């Protein structure tokens, strides 16, 4: 079994660079399917298992996908297939993001129903509501969603009940090739939405308003391959910012963009962390003592749910009582039990978690329950007494490139081992069933 083994007690110092954003590159790779002419070249693509999975989906759909170092070239100009089977969707829910592009390009999509996952039930009703408003007939049955344009894919006015990131993206991508104008209201405002809009525009699309509450898309007849550089990963950057703060270290996180991270920066500053903008990133200096604060996750520009578990690690080390309220996902507290195994004084009350800090964290063997939990448990291990062993690293590999090496370069006492392989000399296959 693969494990990260970390021994607490080292202050982190130095510079670390954020990769391209996972949550930007996944919809953008899906969007490359819209180009019936020319190749797309994407730069700053992170080497993540999720990126390999979405690329496999594209290959299955008959697109050509070539990998270089941090670069992906896609040619989707051939006739496309229209189905995304369960083997892909179960590995990665973001596979449903091929629906919008397939409807735009071919008028048809058959995608396995994603089902729930470790952080909640995660329905896609808002995606489907948007497609239906655009003239798509949607049938759900036998574990699949069958969607087919009835007459023409046409622009529509769509109000989202919740500013869903995935629904905003899926509808934007379908609308890019629809006839007429689509107006989506109450949309997600995440930086990754803006990156997708910029990419669609580079392909010849007409998307306005990304980053505000309303997006307006004028459909065009054809989209072309384009060159695009993916924005830096604000969640990976934020994770290293917490690593610096929790160890009382001094770290420059290159690629961290203040505007993308304002809620995290505000909360960390309230805790006594010093954060300053430098030319190519954010410098984070951890104080001797951290102050307790309350946090509520919200859609952007609110506090990101994808930083909730890492922030929990930081609050465990803070003086006093903190409360974290999770409003985006219904069940994103699975990591709490693992923190308890590390002697954390923490309890769940409904949608909130109460943390009595500072906890005297002890090293333990803990299992990552999702991608961000994997990072958060490692962060807690940086300040725990003794050795922390983090397992279930397939989750970590979905969203972090070289996580342990980057921490080690900052001075952490950390390694990643394959205990079975050490004993038998075999290399273990990473499990694929992760959703
Ligand atoms: C690949 C990617 O970009 N993943 C991100 C994306 O996920 P994802 O796009 O799945 O997240 P959404 O914004 O869609 O989901 C947020 C909430 O809305 C609910 N919902 C969503 C769609 C829908 O049709 N109906 C519905 O009820 C979900 O169950 C959830 O409770 O945004 C999340 C919220 O910032 C992040 O945590 C994920 O890292
Ligand atoms: C929840 C996350 O991703 P996904 O939507 O791909 O599961 C995440 O990045 O923390």
Image: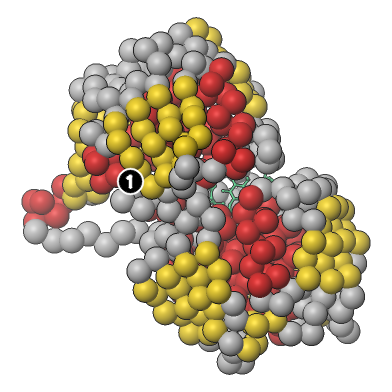
Q: Is residue 406 visible?
A: yes
- Classify mark 1: helix, strand or loop: helix
Quarter of the image for residue 251 reads: top left
Mark 1 closeness class: few <14, some 14–19, many ≥20 residues within 10 Å = some
Residue 224 x, y percent position in the rendering: 65, 83
Residue 85 position within the rendered picture, expressed as x and y whole percent measured from the top left: 55, 73
Q: In the rendered image of this protein, does residue 276 appear above or below residue 28?
A: above
Q: Position of residue 171 (x, y in %)?
A: 76, 64
Q: Residue at x 37, y 74 (%)?
A: 68
Quadrant housing residue 207: bottom right
Q: Nearer the viewer, residue 207 or 280?
A: 280
Q: What residue do we see at 50% from left, 70% from top? A: 42
Residue beneath disc 1: 403
Q: Residue at x 71, y 77 (%)?
A: 204
- Above/below status of 267 relative to 178: above
> 376 or 121: which is nearer to us?
376
- Outermost residue toward the top? 320
Eyeballing the image, is 408 above or below 249?
below
Q: Is 141 situated left or right of 17 in this image?
A: right
Q: Nearer the viewer, residue 259 or 345?
A: 259
């Amino acid at each position: 079994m693969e494990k990260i083994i970390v021994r607490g007690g080292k202050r982190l110092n130095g510079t670390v660079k954020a990769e391209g954003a996972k949550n930007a590159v996944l919809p953008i790779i899906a969007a490359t399917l819209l180009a019936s002419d020319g190749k797309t070249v994407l730069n700053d693509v992170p080497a993540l298992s999720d990126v390999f999975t979405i690329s496999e989906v594209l290959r299955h759909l008959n697109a050509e996908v070539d990998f270089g170092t941090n670069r992906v070239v896609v040619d989707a100009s051939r006739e496309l297939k229209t189905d995304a089977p369960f083997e892909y969707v179960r590995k990665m829910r973001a596979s449903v993001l091929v629906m919008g592009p397939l409807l735009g390009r071919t008028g048809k999509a058959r995608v396995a129903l994603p089902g729930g996952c470790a952080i909640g039930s995660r329905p896609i009703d808002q995606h489907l509501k948007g497609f239906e408003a655009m003239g798509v007939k949607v049938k759900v049955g036998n574990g699949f969603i069958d969607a087919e344009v009835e007459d023409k894919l046409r622009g529509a006015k769509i109000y989202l009940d919740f500013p869903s990131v995935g629904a905003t993206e899926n509808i934007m991508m379908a609308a890019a090739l629809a006839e007429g104008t689509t107006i989506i209201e109450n949309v997600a405002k995440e930086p990754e939405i803006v990156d997708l809009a910029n990419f669609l525009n580079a392909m010849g699309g007409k998307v306005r308003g990304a980053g505000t509450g309303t997006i307006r898309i004028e459909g065009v007849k054809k989209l072309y391959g384009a060159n695009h550089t993916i924005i830096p990963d604000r969640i990976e950057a934020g994770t290293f910012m917490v690593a610096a703060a929790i160890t009382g270290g001094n770290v420059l996180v290159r690629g961290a963009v203040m505007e993308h991270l304002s809620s995290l920066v505000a909360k960390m500053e309230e805790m006594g962390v010093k954060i300053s903008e430098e030319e190519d990133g954010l410098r984070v200096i951890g104080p001797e003592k951290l102050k307790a604060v309350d946090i509520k996750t919200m859609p952007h520009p609110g506090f990101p749910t994808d930083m909730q578990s890492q922030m929990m690690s930081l609050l465990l080390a803070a003086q006093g009582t903190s409360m974290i309220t999770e409003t985006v996902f219904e069940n994103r507290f699975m990591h709490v039990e693992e923190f308890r195994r590390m002697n954390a004084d923490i309890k769940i009350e409904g949608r909130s978690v109460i943390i009595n800090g500072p906890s005297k964290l002890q090293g333990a063997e803990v299992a990552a329950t999702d991608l961000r939990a994997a990072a958060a448990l490692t962060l807690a291990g940086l300040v725990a007494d003794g050795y922390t062993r983090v397992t279930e690293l397939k989750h970590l590999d979905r969203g972090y490139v070289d996580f342990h090496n980057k921490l080690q370069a900052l001075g952490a006492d950390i390694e990643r081992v394959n205990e079975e392989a050490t004993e038998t000399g075999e290399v273990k296959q990473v499990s694929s069933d992760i959703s």
